[in-house]
Image: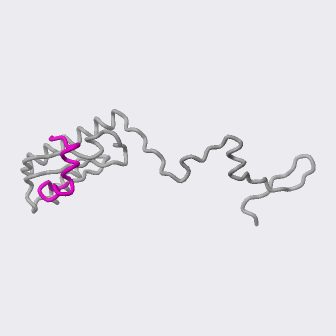
């Protein structure tokens, strides 16, 4: 059994398989192959997404400071830059002052916010070496 049945010529009733165009024929006919095989561009974030994500980041910072004694919370990454933030992004936060023993409890507490974006939490004291440039360039103290 054929997975793609042939077409039938309306004039004489004979079956035939349609001819597939070559890449050169497609180009000559005005087709465009630029970008073929590339990842599609991410959709630009809506202003509502940026506002909602920023409100969640602010709420997370308040929780980290009030409940987990964070001395500093910095927003960095795509939300801070606002250039590539979209629905598949996360909210990147770096914190200082949260005891190691409370780190996972803090993550679990932030998970209860019900954010459509994952909240990534870095301990600032331990990650300044690899996040230092991003924090200096894009970081926003919350």
Q: Which residue is painted at 90% across and 52% down in the image?
A: 13
Which of the 4 image quadrants contains residue 137?
A: top left
Residue 132 pos. (x, y %)? 18, 51
Residue 140 pos. (x, y %)? 18, 41
* On-image quarter of the N terminus: bottom right
Asked if the magenta segment contains residue 118, the reply would be: no
Q: Is residue 45 left or right of residue 139?
A: right
Q: Residue furthest bottom?
A: 1
Q: Which residues are magenta?
A: 122-142
Residue 77 pos. (x, y %)? 27, 46
Q: Identify the colour scheme used.
A: one colour
Which of the 4 image quadrants contains residue 42?
A: top left
Q: Is residue 122 left or right of residue 50?
A: left
Instruction: Look at the magenta stretch and give its main secondary structure.
Output: helix
Q: Residue furthest top?
A: 47
Q: Is residue 38 left or right of residue 45?
A: right
Which of the 4 image quadrants contains residue 81?
A: top left
Compared to 14, does 139 lie above or below? above
Q: Residue furthest right?
A: 12
Compared to 28, does 23 lie above or below? below
> Front-most of 104 and 32?
32
Asked if the magenta segment contains residue 136, the reply would be: yes
Q: Which residue is painted at 37% across and 45% down in the image?
A: 87
Residue 64 pos. (x, y %)? 13, 48
Compared to 128, does 42 lie above or below? above
Q: Which residue is painted at 19% across and 47% down in the image?
A: 135
């Amino acid at each position: 059994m054929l997975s793609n049945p042939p077409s039938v010529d309306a004039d004489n009733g004979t079956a035939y398989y349609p001819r597939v165009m070559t890449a050169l024929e497609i180009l000559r006919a005005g087709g465009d192959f630029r970008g073929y095989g590339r990842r599609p561009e991410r959709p630009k974030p809506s202003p509502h997404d940026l506002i909602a994500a920023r409100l969640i980041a602010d709420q997370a910072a308040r929780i980290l400071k009030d409940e987990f004694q964070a001395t500093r919370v910095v927003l960095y990454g795509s939300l801070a830059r606002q250039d590539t933030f979209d629905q598949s992004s996360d909210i990147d936060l770096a914190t200082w002052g949260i005891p190691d023993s409370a780190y996972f409890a803090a993550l679990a507490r932030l998970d209860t916010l019900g954010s459509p974006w994952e909240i990534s939490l870095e301990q600032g004291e331990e990650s300044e070496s690899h996040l230092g440039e991003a924090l200096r360039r894009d970081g926003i103290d919350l």
